[in-house]
Amino acid sequence: METKFFSQEELDKAVALLAKGELVAFPTETVYGLGALATNEQAVKSVYAAKGRPSDNPLIVTVADEMMMADYAREIPERARKLIKEFWPGPLTLLLFVKPGSLPKAVTGGLETVAFRCPDDELTRSLIAKLGAPIVGPSANTSTKPSPTTAEHVYHDLNGRIAGIIDGGPARVGLESTIIDLSVKDPVVLRPGEITPQQLSSVLDEEVLINTGKVTDQAIPKAPGMKYRHYAPSAPVVVVDTVQDFSDLNLNKQTGVIALDTVLEKLNLPAANKFSLGDSLVSADHSLFDGLRYFDDQEQIKQIYVQGFNGTQASLAYMNRLNKAAAGHHYQAK
């Protein structure tokens, strides 16, 4: 199969492919998603096959608007309406009870809930509106690898496995959406993202909890990113929690460092062994996956050290992704 790139002017071609059950990657403000018609069970199963994704890992359903979501959600509670008014379209995913029989088991994992998202990307919302039905939207990468933030990243991982890629340019945010579970008594963030629990609490006028539990091997996760390893390049990743620890590292031509500019400028390493996270946590969020992919393409790199950020809700999403990429490994000063 030849994977084709589609421009904004060729959107109808992408719509036609999706309608036929083909897979098409699409842009969002967070990362690129891998689209398939959500009501077509065979197409959805093809997503798992293309990504090499475990079949018990539920998929996010991407909609054009709240009206489309209403066709598949059993109900839209008042909490959801408040969050939609404030954050949609945008990087927030809502976990709600699904309308029985409206979506195949391949989407829900057999659960009574499903996650809905309306992205802040006019191109993709137009794609879904033209299709007239929602699409599933997991990240458009090989399972366990860093999520794609450009069309070229998607092509690198999935060329020959999917029909097409809609090129919408680089993703603005760079980390996946916040997922909030509204199917329980107390709302809880299952996956942190750009929208923080504090922001959600402010809109809902109640405390929003943060999930800290682990999903057992036998259990089906309620949302993506809760059970399996994610975001990992081939070389092992180690989190460096304090800036001072970078001076203790044994750095050589086989090590790569991903950090803020203020850290990198002090390291005695060739430029090719450094990847900049910019000058702030915001730029670090945007650049983390790019950095992991940068070193993943360099066979001589055998160890990757990445700057960690701790202590605030703003760093939750960054550290969630980084800890998964590093499998929880942090540098321990001697």
Image (tube, grey):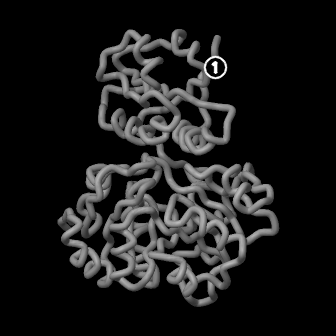
Q: Residue 48 in the image: x percent, y percent? A: 44, 67
Above or below: residue 111 compared with residue 243: below
Residue 301 x %, y %: 36, 27
Residue in view at x 72 percent, y 75 percent: 78
In the image, residue 283 lies at what x, y percent?
A: 45, 36
For the point 47% across and 12% down, the residue is 250
Mark 1 crowd level (few <14, some 14–19, many ≥20, 10 Å Cα) = few
Residue 257 in the image, given as x and y percentages of width and height: 43, 24
Give SS at disc 1.
loop
Number of marks present in the image shown: 1
The front one of 43 and 94 is 94
The residue singled out by tag 1 in the image is: 332
Q: Which residue is located at x 21 percent, y 77 percent? A: 13
Residue 9 or residue 36, whichever sits in front: 9
Please indicate whether residue 287 sits to the left or right of residue 297 in the image: right
What amino acid type should be assigned to the residue bearing mark 1?
Gln
Question: The C terminus lies in which quarter of the figure?
Answer: top right
The reply, left or right, for residue 45 in relation to residue 272 is: right
Quadrant location, the N terminus: bottom left
Quarter of the image for residue 2 reads bottom left
In this rendering, is residue 138 above or below 312? below
**Residue 2 left/right relative to 211:** left
Q: Residue at x 50, y 61 (%)?
A: 90
